[in-house]
Image (spheres, rainbow, N blue to C red):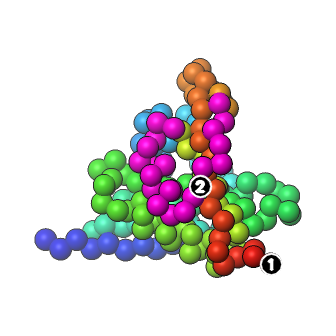
Amino acid sequence: MTTQMCIREMRPDDWPSVCRIYLEGIASRNATFETEAPSWERWDANHHCFGRLIIEVNNQVAGWAALSAVSARQAYSGVAEVSVYVSSDARGNGFGKTLLSGLIEQSEKNDIWTLQASIFPENTASIELHRKFGFREVGRRERIAKLHNVWRDTVLFERRSMRVGLV
């Protein structure tokens, strides 16, 4: 059987699949501080209207990625946070690479000069993925927040565009 893969823009009707994959990340306790998925309306309001990607395999959503603003202040208009989630049954196939590559491309088309990611240190696969795309470790934020009443650290990564914001 031939595997058909495509990457495309996220649509509102993708939300049930996106939410399912997001809930897998929440359940892992190593992907996000969130403990429940938001409604589509809340998620939509908190993410840029560009840089919302879906990866489909055989017409099934296998992963998603999105960009969100780090601040409402104009000075930070070119800084965005990346989110990349791949379904647990689709990991290890390079889908995270495809999604992150697409996010970088979309960010630069939309004048984003810095991408950042806040990653749990235990999420070594995500750390490795971001390093492959030129993200550098900025620092470790110790006991930055609690998840299920346990203090957790995050490692902050950033990637500066080689095409946007050079002047």
Q: Does residue 59 appear left or right of residue 100 in this picture?
A: left
User: Helix or strand or loop: what does disc 2 sit on?
Assistant: strand
> Which residue in the rendered view is the most extreme toward the right?
74
What residue range appears in magenta? 121-142
Q: Which mark is residue 136?
A: 2
Q: Does residue 62 appear left or right of residue 18 in this picture?
A: left
Res 41 seen here: no
Tag 1 residue: 167
Q: Nearer the viewer, residue 135 or 92?
A: 135
Percent from the top left, x then y, of residue 77? 79, 65
Q: Does residue 70 appear left or right of residue 30 in this picture?
A: right
Q: Nearer the viewer, residue 152 or 4?
A: 152
Image quadrant where one finds the N terminus: bottom left
Percent from the top left, x then y, of residue 78? 75, 67
Percent from the top left, x then y, of residue 114? 69, 63
Q: Amino acid at mark 1?
A: Val
Image quadrant where one finds the C terminus: bottom right
> Which residue in the rendered view is the most extreme toward the top?
149
Quadrant assignment, res 151: top right
Res 138 seen here: yes
Quadrant assignment, res 60: bottom left
- Cα distance in 3D space between marks 2 and 1: 21 Å
- Name the residue at 57% across, 69% down: 104
Q: Is residue 141 magenta?
A: yes
- Compared with 36, 48 (above or below) is below
Q: Nearer the viewer, residue 50 or 94?
A: 94
Q: Which mark is residue 156?
A: none
